[in-house]
Image (cartoon, helix red, strand yellow):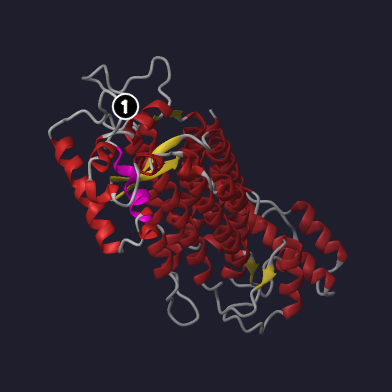
Amino acid sequence: MVERYSRKIMSEKWTQQAKYDAWLKVELAAVRAWNKLGFISDDDCKKICQNAKFDVARIDEIELTTKHDVIAFLTSVSESLGDESRFVHFGMTSSDCIDTAVALQIRDSLELIETDIAELLEAIKSRAIEHKNTLMVGRSHGIHGEPITFGLVLAIWYDEIVRALELLKHAKKVISVGKISGAMGNFAHAPLDLEELTCKELGLSPAPASNQVIQRDRYAQVMSAIAILASSCEKIAVAIRHYQRTEVYECEEYFSPGQKGSSAMPHKRNPVLSENVTGLCRMLRSYALPAMENVALWHERDISHSSVERFILPDAFITADFMLARLTNLVKNLVVYPENMMKNLNLTGGLVFSQRVLLELPKREISRENAYKIVQRNAMKVWADLGQNKPVLNENGESLFLQNLLADTELRESLSQSEIRACFDYSYYTKNVDRIFKRVFEK
């Protein structure tokens, strides 16, 4: 229900009605600016601002003849006015209206995305605190490395999404500009004061310089920020998909009563939500490239960007809004299995402690090269035993790796039994988690 509601609000910002509402908002702001400059009388300004309206169906009807959407819009608006309609769009070109209005739509949409991200961050933070000390194995190349905590994994996700949010906030500032500079951007038919007054009313900054359009590097920054956000969100989704693999089974998506995973196999519980998020993020990244290609328009403008933006802007914002709501619910409801995390942590017979042993030997005046050889030869024996499905623990609860180390006479010349056993302590790896959390969540 949350997902549908969120998507509905965003989609309403990109309807034909919303587009023309934004156009009219810009046109009326320009009328009021002309009034402040003394060009339009108070009476005409009042009539325009009180009576100006449009009809989407009528605009579509007019456009069948004009083949020009802004002219069709202005004609529809003029039909709601009298002689004062001559002051609507005075000294302006189509892109003055369109680009300034689209800036309003993008700005407002980004504010919704910021709210979505704040909810995602809160969900991640809550789960991170919950699992701050939940031990699990860290992996590199998909292979077990050293002990970490699931809370640390979540803290890293949080920190990355914060950076994505900062990029989007910067992009919002970059895009929140308008132009009322005329056909070539030379202000020949309207003073700079008109643009400044119009933009101020709309909560935008005037573009310092523009030709016939707002420059599309601004749009490219927005779409790139969304693409980076999508990449980080997909990173989370891919991790969850891995954790849900049967051989891993450390986390899984919530599987609701009555839910079905497969038409053929009744046992299936698939990571469908995170797979969906992965697909949506691929689409979001795909919108960045055409936005970048829109930067290189011919001379003062062409309209090759227009058809692209009619696709990528509504699609990107609606998709990002939906994806973020889905990912937030996924994280909130994620089922975590600490016991399985611990089982996997012990899966390699103590190999996760190899570096801990390695680093003790140089303290005993053993060269790093020799220390590495001693530890590695004992580790390689464990891999061979694991390949033969040998139990990872003996009857005394000692891991394969610990058994090998204790039996190594060369190692025992440098480390006692108690010193070797002391290396197999999980708390050694979690001693700095609190400080890491302070860095992430209290900055």
Residue at image point 44% right, 56% down: 227
Q: Is residue 88 above or below residue 410?
A: below
Q: Is residue 400 found left or right of 161 in the rendered image?
A: left
**Residue annotated with mark 1:** 397
Q: Is residue 234 magenta?
A: no
Residue at image point 32% right, 24% down: 269
Quarter of image, res 98: bottom right
The quadrant of the picture occupied by the C terminus is bottom right
Choose between 83 and 77: the one closer to the eye. 77
Q: Which residues are magenta?
A: 350-359
Give coordinates of residue 285: x percent, y percent: 39, 56
Give coordinates of residue 389: x percent, y percent: 16, 30
Which residue is at the far left?
Answer: 388
**Disc 1 marks which amino acid?**
Gly
Residue at image point 50% right, 81% down: 300
Choose between 104 and 114: the one closer to the eye. 114
* Neighbours of disc 1 within 10 Å: few (<14), some (14-19), many (20+): few
Q: Is residue 161 above or below residue 151?
A: below
Choose between 381 and 374: the one closer to the eye. 374
Which residue is at the far top?
Answer: 258
Total numbered circles: 1
Which residue is at the far right?
Answer: 42
Q: Main secondary structure of the magenta part?
A: helix
